Image (cartoon, grey):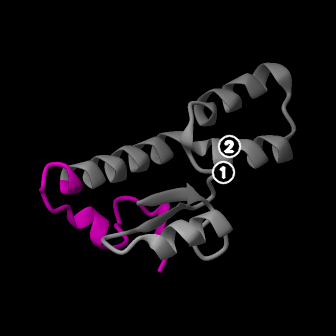
Amino acid sequence: MLMGKANQTHLNNPSWQSFWGQSTDWKRDLSLKRGSHFSYTDAQSFVPALDEHLDIPAELREQYVGTVDPERSTAAQRAYIAAFFDQHLRGRPQHLLDGPSASFPEISFVR
């Protein structure tokens, strides 16, 4: 399973294309709408809080952490990663991995 920021997918990233092309079994490519690289770290939560004290330019903040709500982003990441491990390590099928979910509109399935 690949999980990336907005507009980073196996369709446009050479290293992801290679990985995707070499993967012959189950695979998913998920994209975090309005996310950025550091949306997958604690920075998405503390950078906006620091902004109150450091006056971080909006463009710079958006470049690093995107504009996705940190709580929604974290909830989506936890849900999809847990579903992946439940399905592939515990052998428990997870319908969340079958396609888009109304519970997590922040996540796009890349086909």
Residue 14's disc number: none
Q: CA distance from mark 1 to mark 2?
A: 5 Å
Q: Quadrant of residue 92?
A: bottom left
In percent of width and height, residue 58 lies at 82, 43
The residue located at (42%, 47%) in the rendering is 77
Q: Residue at x 66, y 51 (%)?
A: 36
Q: Is residue 62 above or below residue 91?
A: above
User: Which residue appears farthest toward the bottom when viewing the image?
Assistant: 111
Q: Confirm whether residue 7 shows in the render.
A: no
Is 110 a magenta residue? yes
Query: At numbered mark 1, what does the secondary structure look like: helix, strand or loop?
Result: loop
Q: Amino acid at mark 1?
A: Ser
**Depth check, front residue: 73 or 8:** 8
The magenta segment is 87-111
The residue tagged with tag 2: helix, strand or loop?
helix
Residue at (28, 72) in percent of width and height: 98
The quadrant in which the N terminus is found is bottom left
Report the residue marked by disc 1.
Answer: 36
Residue of label 2: 65
Image spot of residue 51 (x, y percent):
77, 28
The quadrant where residue 24 appears = bottom left
Q: Overall secondary structure of the magenta stretch? A: loop
